[in-house]
Image (cartoon, helix red, strand yellow):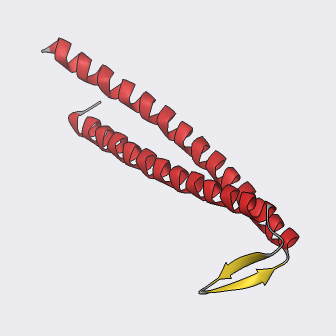
Amino acid sequence: MTEEETQKKISQLQLMEQNIQALLQQRQQFQQKIVEISSALNEIKGTDKAFKIIGNIMVLKEKTELEKDLKHKKELMEIRIKNVEKQETQIRSKAKDLQTEIMEKLEKEKSEK
């Protein structure tokens, strides 16, 4: 591996780390939405009337329909989290392999000097 190839691989590794950070932020956002949805589900359990915010207004909505909508949104967030975690795992694995390759190259160069 040439010096130029090593630099390219280091750049790839840095990009992978940035991607992992972006995925972590995305996962946090999805987890926060799940917390909000769970809180909303708990709130509507103890009430007879339920309202849904649409744009800048609140609209009276059938409680069971609202519960169904919230549960569906929660399931979607959980699926998105699983997908993000899968992507994160794949990138981490590739990054680990690339890091090992770079370290072996640097160690080899160091021992040759």
Task: Report x, y in % for residue 66.
Answer: 80, 71
Residue beneath the point at 87% across and 69% down: 64
Image height of 91 relative to 33, above or below: above
Task: Count the numbered circles shown.
Answer: 0
Image quadrant containing the C terminus: top left
Question: Does residue 69 appear in the picture of this structure?
Answer: yes
**In the rendered image, which quarter is residue 34 located in?**
bottom right
Residue beneath the point at 62% across and 54% down: 35
Residue beneath the point at 49% across and 50% down: 23
In the picture provided, is 59 more to the left or to the right than 12?
right
Image height of 84 relative to 4, above or below: below
- Viewer-nearest residue: 48 or 96: 48
Question: Does residue 72 appear in the picture of this structure?
Answer: no
**In the rendered image, which quarter is residue 5 located in?**
top left
In the picture provided, is 98 more to the left or to the right than 44?
left
- Viewer-nearest residue: 33 or 3: 33
Task: Report x, y in % for residue 87.
Answer: 57, 45
In the picture provided, is 54 more to the left or to the right than 101?
right
**In the rendered image, which quarter is residue 40 located in?**
bottom right
Residue situated furthest top in the rendering: 111
Residue situated furthest left in the rendering: 113
Image quadrant containing the N terminus: top left
Task: Report x, y in % for residue 95.
Answer: 43, 35
Image height of 48 relative to 42, above or below: below
Task: Report x, y in % for residue 75.
Answer: 74, 55
- Viewer-nearest residue: 19 or 30: 30
Residue beneath the point at 65% across and 54% down: 80
In the picture provided, is 34 more to the left or to the right than 89?
right
- Viewer-nearest residue: 44 or 74: 44
